[in-house]
């Protein structure tokens, strides 16, 4: 990696200040994407602002509306162990990467990176979560804006993610054989006012909601209700591990399985 | 009763103590005083003319000692190829040059263009980024058949085409094979690919060059399976250093699988640069570099035809294979698709005539050479797949079809130039069927169905030629090396023994298994024997470890040397006990005079050899050290039968291996536990090839699977708990231990078992699918099911 400076602020305010010092500064959360990127010399930040020492963005609680609120600096392992009020989300966190990744990677880091094959974007979009930042609150429907693209402005840091808890929910991931990221991952959540279906891994536009499935499932929350509901392979990622048509097919399979398991 | 020592005992691997406690001494652990570091600037395009390499800015960067380019190696030899194949017209193969650093052209992504030596690794890398390279890109030659088409861009401008050789074997049988196929009652044809693989040993390659100005000696520490071979190739062909001025050390090596046999540019570079700079120079490959600089394996495209008579007896086999050589000829590359592939095409079966045609092709890809099994997996895969397909076409049981055609009488001369000394294919098949619980399959199938899964069973056989090889024979076949092995047995005064072997252990367990043999022969404890290997200054000239040859060839050399020790110690013992040498018996570390109660202990005799006060000096020299070189009379022929049971998820195409049984005949077995471990490892690699691994290039010659993000290695949960057995033993008839070798078997026998099982599962579910190319990934299975 190229040489860089590192700062370890202990408050969000200090982190914002540190990031604002230069356009070349970059926030470091769990580092599960950024550190390998640095090692490959694909990024050359002037200063890395580590968010790891900021206590106020760690931990899990429930707010008055019953939402599960997760500090952005909370690791996947902590969510897996501590989000008992939202078991589908805890299960999703428990199946990200391997133990080393889960002990370092954070929910804020994952959502800020918005890898098109990551699990958390599906969980957040599927749950209709709210992403709280140092500047504002952004609903998930507005937050995800394409592969590695989000609504975050430069210097804006995610501090918390608020998840409404659905009546039923489940995440199904079909792993890419090499990376074991989601070749296709589907998060299904049934709320009193309707069903949300969020898909990761499949689309060239990153995580998306499968509205046809949502409409059908909102009327009849059963796997059978999806018979005949299909997705086009157009716009789906096509690579060594599967064509767009295959991914589109898997979205259907994983959605059915998620509904059945919810 | 399992033995607790000697041949046949499952002695625990003594080397694992240091491997598992982090105290191994790998090449990267070697750091010399004043050591500098090299970073190679590698081509990021597959093919292009090198117009200029401007190193000026780089030379001024902090810490930089020197920047080398191809021009610095203009007077230095290129990397040699160790095997010359003669084509079907009697002409030698086309053999291009292989410069240490690119000259004039780059020919694959990863081809080294320049090398920066600096005080630190990071400084070398920083400076490498400052080198300005101007490349005129040329069209990349990637597809083998397109590479042979008229007008194709040439990888090497000085060759007449991209064809390395067009090999026919046995050429004299061609017409007979054509006629037999024409008149056959049934011909089954199968076209398939044997997927390109990256070896991926746990330890990436490392080289440290060192130079001693006062003695003019060079030393290379390197991750090699055969340090003597590297010394010869690099010294004689590349750098012009005679062996007595060059030492090559391959210390602990963390896996090779073939990829560490070859002489690589980085080794020659570090040795050369150490002398040029009078500083030790170290290179440590990154994993990313390994993907584009370690020799790859396999990469064959094959059409095989199996002709049968009206009674389902095999009548003839004809194959046509395109074998990818990559951009240059790696050390043993030409021999893999020919002599290590064509000679195994008879498999375990009586087929009267066989013709194998192989076209080796240059492409703008990483060079391809041996990878665990090397040619034999490719032969086994096509043969065992086409037999399965034939059985289905004929409506006969695939196991019965195999049994009907088994070779049952030995020795057996195949129509592809080799003679199997011994084997019992029905015996291993019987054992396999017992292990695989064939009678329980229907119940397991029903249970899978209940869960919505498809289930299939695949069975196949394999044979391989190991213990490579009789030097005079391989010399006739084009090898530019002998393939004997060496051992020196040094008995110390107090009775302990150091054995120096020309074999090399990079995971195989020689340090445990070899002492078992010597201990058994002498009747002393294994702990009294230590194995030394991997240092050309210690062991006599040896050819190293590959092709499952260590115990069969290296072990035999050790037996021969130990026999000389026994003969000499008996003479000494006879003298000490004033008895006739003919009456001396050695048992349990005691020399006794037959029929008497007179005895002397092992240690008394060894001490006498070094303190020869009471010693037959007029008859024999003092000291107790013997060397033997063993050149095998034939290959060894391990064989076996494998069974794989898979489940296929019809919704996703994902294949899971539910059961795997391997019945092997390795001849006599020295350490059953180590042998089981070798089989387990081979199976994991074979299953990896069958289900997961794929070194895929795009049409521009970019490696798509150039990291673990896209290259799928098998992990623990991808493989089942294996059932392995090697109790079927027909000892090799021509080596003193009766051993055959076991290192590659698992990787050879398992891919067809997996694919046979997947095809079986799909056919049972009504799909008209006869073949799916490896890796049988979820997306490929799903696509096949869509028709």
Image (cartoon, coloured by chain):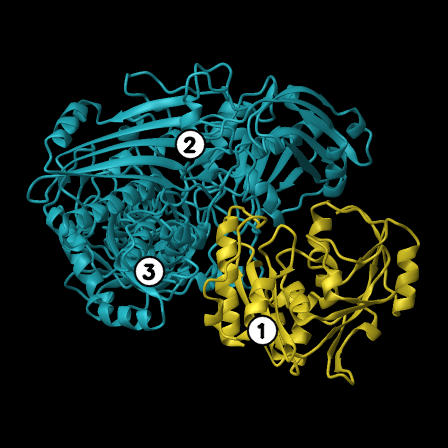
Chain colours: A yellow, B cyan
Q: Residue at point 69% right, 46% down?
A: A40
Mark identifier at residue B324: 2
Chain letter belonging to callout 3: B
Q: Nearer the viewer, mark 2 or mark 1?
A: 1
Dot 3 falls on a residue whose secondary structure is: loop
Q: Secondary structure at mark 1?
A: helix
Q: Quadrant of residue B373?
A: top left
**Where B763 sits versus B379, above or below?**
below
Q: Residue at x 65, y 73 (%)?
A: A77
Residue wearing tag 3:
B671
* Circle 3 or circle 1, nearest the eye: 1
Name the chain under label 2: B
How far is mark 3 from mark 1, CA to CA?
A: 64 Å
Q: Is residue B344 left or right of residue B421?
A: right
Camera-nearest residue between B727 and B511: B727
Query: The N terminus of chain B appears in which quarter of the rendering?
Result: bottom left
> x and y percent of residue B714 in the render?
46, 56
Mark 2 to mark 1 CA distance (whole Å): 55 Å
Task: Quickly name the residue at label 1.
Answer: A218
Question: What is the tally of numbered marks visible in this picture?
Answer: 3
* Residues at circles 2 and 3 in contact by the CB criterion of under 8 Å: no
Residues behind callouts 3 and 1 on a single chain: no
Residue B178 point in image, percent of width and height: 17, 27
Instruction: State which chain disc 1 sits on.
Output: A
Q: Outermost residue, left direction?
A: B311
The part of the image, by quadrant, that contains residue B678 is bottom left
Give the Cα distance between marks 2 and 3.
37 Å
SS at circle 2: strand
Badge 2 crowding class, 10 Å Cα cut-off, few under 14, some 14 to 19, many 20 or more, is many
Question: Residue drawn at (89%, 70%), measured in percent from left and top?
Answer: A11
Quarter-wise, where is residue A116 in the image?
Answer: bottom right
């Amino acid at each position: 990696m190229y040489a860089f400076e590192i700062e370890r602020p202990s408050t969000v305010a200090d982190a914002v200040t540190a990031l604002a010092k230069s356009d070349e500064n970059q926030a470091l959360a769990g580092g599960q994407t950024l550190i390998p990127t640095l090692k490959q010399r694909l990024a050359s930040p002037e200063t890395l602002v580590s968010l790891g020492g900021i206590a106020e963005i760690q931990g899990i609680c429930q707010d008055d509306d019953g939402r599960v609120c997760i500090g952005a600096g909370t690791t996947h392992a902590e969510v897996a162990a501590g989000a008992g009020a939202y078991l589908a989300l805890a299960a999703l966190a428990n199946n990200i990467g391997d133990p080393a990744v889960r002990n370092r990677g954070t929910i804020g880091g994952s959502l800020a990176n918005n890898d098109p094959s990551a699990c958390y974007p599906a969980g957040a979009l599927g749950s209709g979560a709210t992403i709280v930042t140092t500047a504002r609150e952004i609903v998930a429907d507005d937050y995800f804006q394409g592969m590695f693209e989000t609504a975050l402005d430069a210097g804006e840091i995610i501090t918390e993610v608020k998840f409404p808890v659905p009546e039923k929910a489940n995440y199904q991931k079909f792993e890419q054989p090499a990376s074991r990221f989601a070749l296709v991952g589907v998060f299904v959540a049934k709320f009193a006012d309707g069903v949300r279906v969020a898909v990761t891994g499949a689309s060239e536009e990153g995580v998306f909601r499968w509205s046809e499935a949502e409409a059908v499932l909102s009327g009849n929350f059963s796997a059978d209700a999806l018979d005949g509901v299909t997705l086009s392979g157009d716009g789906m990622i096509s690579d060594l591990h599967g064509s767009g048509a295959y991914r589109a097919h898997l979205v259907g399979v994983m959605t059915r399985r998620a509904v059945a398991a919810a | 009763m399992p033995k607790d020592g000697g041949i046949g005992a499952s002695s625990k691997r003594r080397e694992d103590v240091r491997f598992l406690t982090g105290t191994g001494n790998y090449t990267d652990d070697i750091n010399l005083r004043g050591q500098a570091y090299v970073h190679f600037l590698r081509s990021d395009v597959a093919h292009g003319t090198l117009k200029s390499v401007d190193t000026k800015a780089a030379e001024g960067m902090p810490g930089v000692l020197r920047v080398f380019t191809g021009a610095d190696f203009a007077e230095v030899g290129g990397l040699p190829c160790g095997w010359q194949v003669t084509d079907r017209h009697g002409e030698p193969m086309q053999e291009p040059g292989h410069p240490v650093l690119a000259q004039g052209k780059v020919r694959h992504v990863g081809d080294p263009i320049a090398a920066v030596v600096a005080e630190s690794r990071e400084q070398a890398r920083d400076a490498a980024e400052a080198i300005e390279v101007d490349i005129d890109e040329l069209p990349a030659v990637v597809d083998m058949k397109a590479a042979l088409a008229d007008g194709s861009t040439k990888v090497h401008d000085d060759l007449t085409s991209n064809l390395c050789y067009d090999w026919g074997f046995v050429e004299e049988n061609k017409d007979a094979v054509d006629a037999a196929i024409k008149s056959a009652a049934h011909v089954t044809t199968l076209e398939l690919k044997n997927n390109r693989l990256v070896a991926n040993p746990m330890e990436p390659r490392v080289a440290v060059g060192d130079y001693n100005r006062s003695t003019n000696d060079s030393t290379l520490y390197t991750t090699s399976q055969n340090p003597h071979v590297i010394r010869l190739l690099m010294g004689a062909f590349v750098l012009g250093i005679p062996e007595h001025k060059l030492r090559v050390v391959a210390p602990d090596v963390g896996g090779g699988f073939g990829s560490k046999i070859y002489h690589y540019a980085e080794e020659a570079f570090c040795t050369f640069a150490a002398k040029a700079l009078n500083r030790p120079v170290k290179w440590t490959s990154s994993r990313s570099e390994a993907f584009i600089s370690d020799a790859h394996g396999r990469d064959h495209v094959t059409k095989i035809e199996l002709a049968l008579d009206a009674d389902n007896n095999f009548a003839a086999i004809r194959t046509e294979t395109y074998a990818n050589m990559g951009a240059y000829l790696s050390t043993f590359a030409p021999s893999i698709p020919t002599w290590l592939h064509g000679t195994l095409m008879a498999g375990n079966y009586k087929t009267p005539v066989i013709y194998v045609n192989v076209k080796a092709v240059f492409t703008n890809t990483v060079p391809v050479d041996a990878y665990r099994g090397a040619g034999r997996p490719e032969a086994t895969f096509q043969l065992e797949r086409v037999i399965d397909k034939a059985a289905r076409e004929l409506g006969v049981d695939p196991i019965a079809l195999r049994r009907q055609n088994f070779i049952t009488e030995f020795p057996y001369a195949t129509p592809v130039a080799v003679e199997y000394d011994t084997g019992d294919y029905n015996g291993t098949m019987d054992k396999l069927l017992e292990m695989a619980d064939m009678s329980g399959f229907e119940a397991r199938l029903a249970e899978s169905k209940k869960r919505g899964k498809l289930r299939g069973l695949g069975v196949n056989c394999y044979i391989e030629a190991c213990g490579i090889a009789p030097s005079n024979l391989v010399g006739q076949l084009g090898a530019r090396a002998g393939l004997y092995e060496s051992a020196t047995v040094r008995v110390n005064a107090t009775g302990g023994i150091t054995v120096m072997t020309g074999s090399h252990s990079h995971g195989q367990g020689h340090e445990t298994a070899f002492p078992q043999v010597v201990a058994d022969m002498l009747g002393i404890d294994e702990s009294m024997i230590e194995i030394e290997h991997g240092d050309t200054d210690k062991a006599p000239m040896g050819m190293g470890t590959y092709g499952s040859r260590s115990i069969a060839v290296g072990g035999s050399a050790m037996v021969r040397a130990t026999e000389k020790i026994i003969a000499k110690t008996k003479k000494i013992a006879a003298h000490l006990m004033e008895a006739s040498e003919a009456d001396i018996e050695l048992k349990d570390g005691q020399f006794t005079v037959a029929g008497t109660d007179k005895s002397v202990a092992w240690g008394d005799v060894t001490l006498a050899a070094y303190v020869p006060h009471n010693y037959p000096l007029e008859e024999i020299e003092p000291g107790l050290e013997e060397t033997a070189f063993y050149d095998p009379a034939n290959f060894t022929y391990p064989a076996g039968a494998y069974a794989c049971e898979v489940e296929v998820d019809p919704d996703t195409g994902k294949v899971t291996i539910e059961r795997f049984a391997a019945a092997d005949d390795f001849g006599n077995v020295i350490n059953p536990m180590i042998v089981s471990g070798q089989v387990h490892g081979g199976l994991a690699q074979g299953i990896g090839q069958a289900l997961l691994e794929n070194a895929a290039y795009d049409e521009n010659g970019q490696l798509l699977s150039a990291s673990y993000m896209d290259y799928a290695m098998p992990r623990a949960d991808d493989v089942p708990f294996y059932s392995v057995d090697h109790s079927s033993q027909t000892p090799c008839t021509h080596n003193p231990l009766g051993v055959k070798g076991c290192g590659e078997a698992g990787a050879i026998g398992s891919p067809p078992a997996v694919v046979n099982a997947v095809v079986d599962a799909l056919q049972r579910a009504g799909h008209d699918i006869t073949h799916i190319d490896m890796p049988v990934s979820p997306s490929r299975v799903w696509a096949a099911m869509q028709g």
